[in-house]
Structure formats: structure tokens, C-alpha cells
Image (cartoon, rainbow, N blue to C red):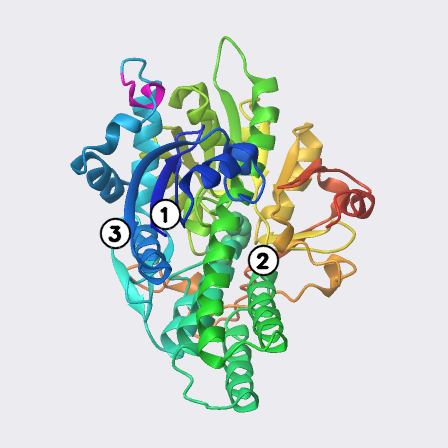
Amino acid sequence: MKNYVYIVECSDGTWYTGWTNDIEKRLKAHNSGHGAKYTRARRPVRLIYTEEYDTPKEAQRREYALKQLTRRQKEQLVCGSGQEMHRSRDTQRTDTGKEDRKMNVEQFFDQVLTVRLTPDRQAIDIIDQTLLPGTIRRINLETKEEIWEAIKKLRVRGAPAIGITAAYGMAVLSSRIQAQDYDSFYREFSELKEYLASSRPTAVNLFWALNRMDDCLQKAASDGRSLDEIREILYTEAEAIRDEDVQISRNIGEIGFGLLKDLKKADRPVGILTHCNAGTLATGKYGTATAPMYIALEQGWAGDDMHVYCDETRPLLQGARLTSFELSSAGITTTVQCDNMASLLMKSGKIDIIFVGCDRVAANGDAANKIGTSGLAILAKHYGIPFYVCAPTSTIDRSTPTGEQIPIEMRDPDEVTQMWYSERMAPQGIDVFNPAFDVTDHSLITGMITEKGLCTDPFDKDFDKYGI
Ligand code: MRU
């Protein structure tokens, strides 16, 4: 029996790579949605590339290697193979300008891919976000200390990206556990898990991802899997967490785009305000708060059909350094303002809607996000501007009853007093208040966009409705 590694092009222009021993059956599955959950929302798909292998193992290895390639590398492979005649005529079209734009955004996503495994799966390859926007440099995280430090120091940051990194970290580190029996293996796994969990306290995705890896390990053990099989299963689970995140943020984007469409005006762009970076750099692909904007581009909006105002986001400047970099690179009209300018901006009538991300949402809908978010929500209420929190369900923590119980990370005073200045800007030894997050009261939130649907106050009822 032959084994195939294949690439299909989905209805939205994205590509999906898989392997199968029955290509016809698999295509039917993709196009009917049964048993092909990652492409279900992107049907129909078209086969654009195949390779044949004698054994499933060879095909799986090749599938894995292909999944590590950037979109541009995959395009070179597909074009070079002469198989591109399978590609849909619609997506090869470049005369409308719409497809060109879509390609540019896709290329940008490839260029700044936040986190992935190295091809030998022995390290995590991240874009070092502390160097952006001036330098795009990728670094490998090999040891548990390097992974911990990268999360702590915000080399990789944003709730979903932290979760993905932790999941990859557990897979990489577990592959090196030498233990010969399950109990010793699990003891070491638990120590590593606890260590990574200590890197940052607020984003619940970190703990969610670590617990999911733990559950997966325990299930595999109770199914009687060997330690070697368990090591492999952990890699698969980490990849699933990443792949699901891409789909989740896409769903959030589609719901958010529905809101944007209703605001579209003939005479001026839709004004959007965002805080911190809940963008592609913070997730597997589309971001959460930025996803509606990227979907808008895909749907044919021009970059100047919207105008995104990015709060600078003191003290670590995620808005100025990361969000404005992302959005302007994708061709979206972008302005940066200091955090304390948001009130004037809202008063001027330029802001139609606010999208922010979140790091942990309590059971009652109180939402922790980057420091400064709750102030924006209060201002938005004053000016009557809709305020939406974009929340993957992995960020909703129903075991935390209200925002009061969300632990808030306190960070190094130097981030406030000297980090961005050529000389210190506050007296030596001055007391500094530097919380990384605040909690927006649920009553200030117009809606919470999850991948399952839009939730409104009382949030717990909607969380129940969507099975969150
Ligand atoms: O300290 P950071 O940069 O990790 O804070 C990030 C945020 O506050 C984001 O808004 C949040 O994690 C959501 S990312 C989709």
C-alpha cells in the first residue's frame, strides 16, 4: 500500500499538509468535514501536491518536515515539482489585487512565525520579540532554563504563544528524559512542568497547555503506551495545540470581522483601537484582537479601509514595537499613540470599536489583560464606544470565580525607570509600581469573542451555552 504526503489548498487560500494511505478517501473527508477537523471550516479544499512513500513511518517523517517549512518554501516545492496545475485558478489570479494582498499577508505571517519546532525537534525556534521591530532574529531554545528565560523575559509572549511554547517545551524536554520506567519518567515530567509553570503567573494558557500535555501523557500511559510512544505522542499533542490555535484565532477573526463590516462607512475608514499586542506575534497565526483585521484583508478590504490606533503600551511597548510593526507590514493604516492619549482620541470620534486580547478571564467575565486595558474600557463606556475582548476558550478559566482571584504579575522596576532610556529617568532607589496586567470588570465589556461564539454579560450563561 502506498503512503502519501499531500498538500491541499483550502477555500481561504491557506494550505494544509497531511499524510494518508488513501488519498481519494482523505480528500472526501476534507471536503465533507468528517474526520478532518483542521480544515473543516476552510472547505472545500483542492489537492495541489503529493509525494509517495513505501512506509507510513517515512510518510509521517516527511509530513512533519513539510510542516516545518514556511509558506514560501512550500510554494517553491510545489512549483518546482510541476504539480502546480492542480492549484485552483482562483487563487493563482493576481489581476484583482485582492489575491496579491492576501499573499503579502501570508508571506508576512511566514516571516514572523512566532514559534515552531526545529526540524530535528530538539529545540524550539522563536522570533526574539525583545529585538523587534529593528531586528528580526530567530533563536533556538534548547534547555529548560532557556525556555523559562524566554517566557519570563518576553522573548516569546502573549497568552496563546506562551501556551504553545510551553507545550513544545514539554515535548522537547520529555524526549530527553532518560528514565526507563513510567513512574520515574512521570516524576521528571512533573518537575519540568512545575518549573515552566513558574515562568509567568497571569496568562492561564501557560497552565492550560501544561495540564493538557500532562493529561495526554497520563491517557497514553493508561492506554498501555510505551515510553517511546509517549514521547512521540507528546510531540503530536504540542503540534495539535499549535494547529488548533491557528483555527481558533481564525474563528475569532471571522466573528470580529462581522462586527467590523457593520461599521463600514463610505466616507472614512473604520477606526479601531487596540492595546498591547494580541497579534500574530502573540499566537500561532492571526492573533486574537488583530484577527478581524487580517480577515478583513482576506475578504478584500484595502489596508486603508480601516485605521488602527495602537496604544504604545507602557512600559514594555508591545503596541509601539510589535502591533504597529505587524499591522503596518500587512499594509493596514496604523497610528501609534501614547497610552494617555486614548481619551482624546476617543473624544475626537475617530474610534468606532475597540478590540483587545486577554490573559485570563474569570468565570464572571472579568478579564485580565495588559496593564492599561481596564482604563480603556472605562473610557470606552464614557464615550459609548463598543469594547470587545477577544478570548480563545483556553484563556477562560472558570475555576477562577472573579477577577479578584487572578494573580497579577509584578515586574522589574527597571522596566519603568530605565529600560528604554539612554539614562535613568527616575531617581535611584525610587519605589516603583509595575504590575504587568489589570482586570477589566465584566460590566464594562460589550462582548467577548471566543472561537465558539460571541458572549455577552451575564458571561457565565453564555459560557455554559457554548460549553466553555
Ligand atoms: O506581557 P505580555 O506581552 O505577554 O502581555 C500580552 C497581552 O496582554 C495580550 O493582550 C494577551 O496575552 C493576549 S495575546 C493574544
In this rendering, the answer to whether 122 lies above or below 342 is below
Label 1 crowding class (10 Å Cα cut-off): few <14, some 14-19, many 20+? many
Sequence-earlier tag: 3 or 1: 3
Q: CA distance from mark 2 to mark 3?
A: 26 Å
Sequence-earlier tag: 1 or 2: 1
The residue mark sitting in front, 3 or 1, is 3
**Residue 200: x %, y % from top left:** 53, 69
Q: Residue furthest top?
A: 266
- Tell me which segment is drawn in magenta: 89-94
Label 3 crowding class (10 Å Cα cut-off): few <14, some 14-19, many 20+? few
Q: Nearer the viewer, residue 286 or 72?
A: 72
Q: CA distance from mark 3 to mark 1?
A: 12 Å
Q: Main secondary structure of the magenta part?
A: helix
249 horizontally vs 416: left or right? right
In this rendering, the answer to whether 342 lies above or below 167 is above
Q: Nearer the viewer, residue 249 or 435?
A: 249
Mark 1 highlights which residue?
321
Q: Secondary structure at mark 1?
A: helix
Mark 3 highlights which residue?
136
Indicate the amino acid at tag 1.
Answer: Arg
Q: Is residue 93 magenta?
A: yes
Identify which residue is drawn at 55% across, 37% down. 40
Indicate the amino acid at tag 2.
Answer: Phe
In this rendering, the answer to whether 215 lies above or below 383 is below
169 horizontally vs 7: left or right? right
Say whether mark 2 is within 8 Å of ligand 1: yes
**Residue 311: x %, y % from top left:** 48, 41
Disc number placed over residue 437 in the picture, else none: 2
Label 2 crowding class (10 Å Cα cut-off): few <14, some 14-19, many 20+? many
